[in-house]
Image (spheres, rainbow, N blue to C red):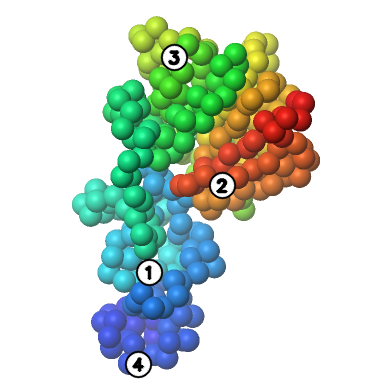
Amino acid sequence: MLEALLGRIPTPTISRLVPRRERETISGGCIKMRRLSAAEPQPDWSADFSPLHVSNCKRERNGLAAREHSTLKRNKFRAPEMKGGMDDKLKRRIGYVRQKLFGSFPGYPVIKPTDTCGVEVLAERAFQDSCREVASLTLLDTPRLANLWQLCRMTNPGGNIIEIGSFKGGGALHLSNSCPERTVIVCDSFEGFKQLDPNLDRNFDAEMFRNTSQGRVEELFRSRGRKYRIVAGFFPQSCAGVELGSISFVHLDADIYKSTIESLEYLDKRMIERSLMVLDDYFRRADGVNQAVGEFTARHKSWTAFPLFPGQGLLIHRSWFGDEK
Ligand SMILES: C[S@@+](CC[C@H](N)C(=O)[O-])C[C@H]1O[C@@H](n2cnc3c(N)ncnc32)[C@H](O)[C@@H]1O
């Protein structure tokens, strides 16, 4: 009742009526209103936002985050219980439309926005061309494409590049553009996810990423005369009987726990010296990815994980620092 009432009262009135402590604990679908001033500490989003938070700005899954932004724009945010009620798919759709209307956003209050002045990779013609080419074929944003571009080029040119979770193929094509002389192994089920963990993978649902086609992805590489191999099916089982060759760069963008942990374990043995693995969605509320990386690095002490902004992880092997593989 109180909540229903609060939902209709403008923020300044609430400030007068409800003590601050209470305002912060009111939940249940109604708007929790609190003005953010520069002097105030930012709210701890991690505490209760996970059901609403959609792990990144990827179009396929950013609807809720977009709504999160538009409410932030009005200096309010909604309680996690909002997940119940309206159909999740519909919520994402509404969020997507809102994002279209209000423009894209980082999703959180950014105190000092990214300073792109003089950033060399952004000025690189080939990088710009590649970003333009893959824009409609990838969910990855420019910073993540820049990380992939630069890190892939640092790895052993004698090894293949592999992407697990290629969806429409844009990320894999971008990697191929960064190192056109190397073979890119493009892996996707082309039918979305197989097994979602209800706790770890709750930001994803079984319907996602089905709208792709193996034929079209293959055509991207064939028409450009690139060295490529398509591995269709659920990785790593899909690799049975497939010769991957030696690998020196991995882009692991499979989103969910099972795919991530199985891929890491499978690929570990196939990496050569001067190899890197970049994971998407690391430290981005994709709990499955975080958990998989944690388990993997605990079991394989020779690998260390570093977060990369925004929302990637870099796995680096100690052989980079002189220890043998
Ligand atoms: C976020 S999308 C990949 C986005 C893509 N890298 C891009 O640049 O836009 C995640 C993809 O992982 C795929 N996937 C998840 N688990 C997989 C597995 N075990 N084997 C193969 N593909 C998998 C899904 O089918 C989906 O297409």
Closer to the chain start, of discs 4 and 3, is 4
Mark 1 or mark 2, which is nearer to you?
Answer: 2
Label 2, label 3: how far apart the Cα atoms are: 27 Å
Closer to the chain start, of discs 1 and 3, is 1
Give the x, y percent position of residue 186. 51, 20
Closer to the chain start, of discs 1 and 2, is 1
- Residue at 50 percent across and 24 percent down: it is 153
Amino acid carrying label 4: it is Leu
Looking at the image, do the residues carrying marks 1 and 3 touch, with CB atoms under 8 Å apart? no
As helix, strand or loop, the secondary structure at mark 4 comes to helix
Closer to the chain start, of discs 1 and 4, is 4
Amino acid carrying label 1: it is Phe
Image quadrant where residue 238 sits: top right
Give the residue pinned by disc 4: 17
- Residue at 67 percent across and 37 percent down: it is 261
Label 4, label 2: how far apart the Cα atoms are: 42 Å
Closer to the chain start, of discs 4 and 2, is 4
As helix, strand or loop, the secondary structure at mark 1 comes to strand
- Residue 162 falls left or right of residue 243: left
Looking at the image, do the residues carrying marks 2 and 3 touch, with CB atoms under 8 Å apart? no
